[in-house]
Amino acid sequence: MRIDVVSIFPEYLAPLELSLIGKARQDGLLELNVHDLRTFTTDKHRTVDDTPYGGGAGMVMKPEPWAQALESVAAARENSKPVLIVPSPAGEKFNQALAYELAEEEQLVFACGRYEGIDERVIDWAQDHFRVRPVSLGDYVLNGGEVAVLAMVEAIGRLLPGVVGNPESLVEESHSDGLLEYPVYTKPSAWRDHDVPPILLSGNHGKIAQWRRHEQFRRTAERRPDLMEGLDAGVLSRADRQAL
Ligand SMILES: Nc1cc(-c2ccc3ccn(Cc4ccccc4)c3c2)n[nH]1
C-alpha cells in the first residue's frame, strides 16, 4: 500500500516514522509519503489560506494549492481512482470496519485541512480524480486533520499483512468481532491486594476462553451498549447468549 499525506505541518506526521508503522515502512510493507502543501503554492509568501466568502471568523484554505498537490500525488492508474480521505468534523465516522475496508486499497491520499477547512470546491473537483471520503475521527473538534490521520494510518497500517507480528492478535482485539476486548493480566499474580482472576491461573483453556468471552459481553454491555444492538447474529453463539 501507498499512502500520501498532504499537510501544512508535515512534521506533525513524524510519529509515523516510529514503532510498528515505521518498521513497516523500513520493511517495504508500506510506502508513506508526507507532502508540504506550501510546496504547491506559487506566490512568494507561499499562501495557503484566505478570508471566507460570506464572511465569518477564521480563514479558509485556498483551492489551487490543493488541486496542484492532489494531482501531483495521485498515482496514474488504469482501473480505479485512488481514495482521498478528507478528515472532517462533518465526515462519516471512522471505525474498525472502515479501517479494514481502507486497508484493501492500493493507494490512500489524506488531505489534512487546517483553519476553518478546505474550500469545498476542492472536494467537488476531486470527485473526478478520486473516490472522496470525508471522515470524522469522532464527535469532538480538532484544530486540523493531522491527528485524525495519525490515528487512521496507525489503525489501517497495522492491518496490512506482515505489519503485526502475530496476526492472531488482530482477531481477538476490541471491535474485531463487534465486542470490546477482555481484560488482560501479567505477573505478579498478587499485586497490591489485587489478584489475577484465578480462572486465568487454572490452565483450563476451555474455561479461560469462556470467561474471556463473558468478560467481552459484560464490558460491552456496561461501557458500549450501543454496540450490543449492532451485533451480528453470527457473532452470538449459544454460550454467548447464556452469558448475556
Ligand atoms: N473528528 C474531527 C475531525 C476534525 C477536523 C478535521 C480537519 C479539520 C480542518 C480544520 N479543522 C478545524 C475545524 C473545526 C470545526 C469546524 C471546522 C473546522 C478540522 C477539524 N475535528 N474533529
Image (cartoon, rainbow, N blue to C red):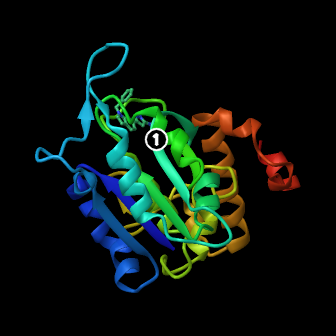
Q: Nearer the viewer, residue 27 or 69?
A: 69
Residue at point 42%, 30% (across, down): 140
**Residue at 52% across / 48% down in the picture?**
126
Residue placed at 19% from the left, 41% from the top?
Answer: 47
User: Looking at the image, in which quadrant does ligand 1 appear?
Assistant: top left
Q: Is 223 displayed left or right of 32 in the figure?
A: right
Mark 1 residue crowding within 10 angstroms, few (<14) / some (14–19) / many (20+): some
- Taking depth in this image into account, of 187 and 18 the one nearest to the observer is 18
Viewed as shown, does residue 187 lie left or right of 81? left
Vertically, is 202 above or below 197? below
Q: Is residue 206 above or below residue 97?
A: below
- Who is closer to the viewer here, 132 or 216? 132
Number of labels in the image equals: 1
* Residue kind at label 1, given as amino acid type: Val
- Residue 209 visible in the current orientation: yes
Answer yes or no: is residue 151 visible. Answer: no
Q: Secondary structure at mark 1?
A: helix
Q: Position of residue 215 (x, y in %)?
A: 63, 50
**Residue 154: which quarter of the image?**
bottom left
Residue carrying label 1: 122
Query: Is residue 232 rendered to the left or right of residue 90?
Result: right
Residue sitting nearer the eye, 181 or 41: 41
- Image position of 3 (left or right of 33): right
Residue shown at 32%/37% (left/top)?
A: 62
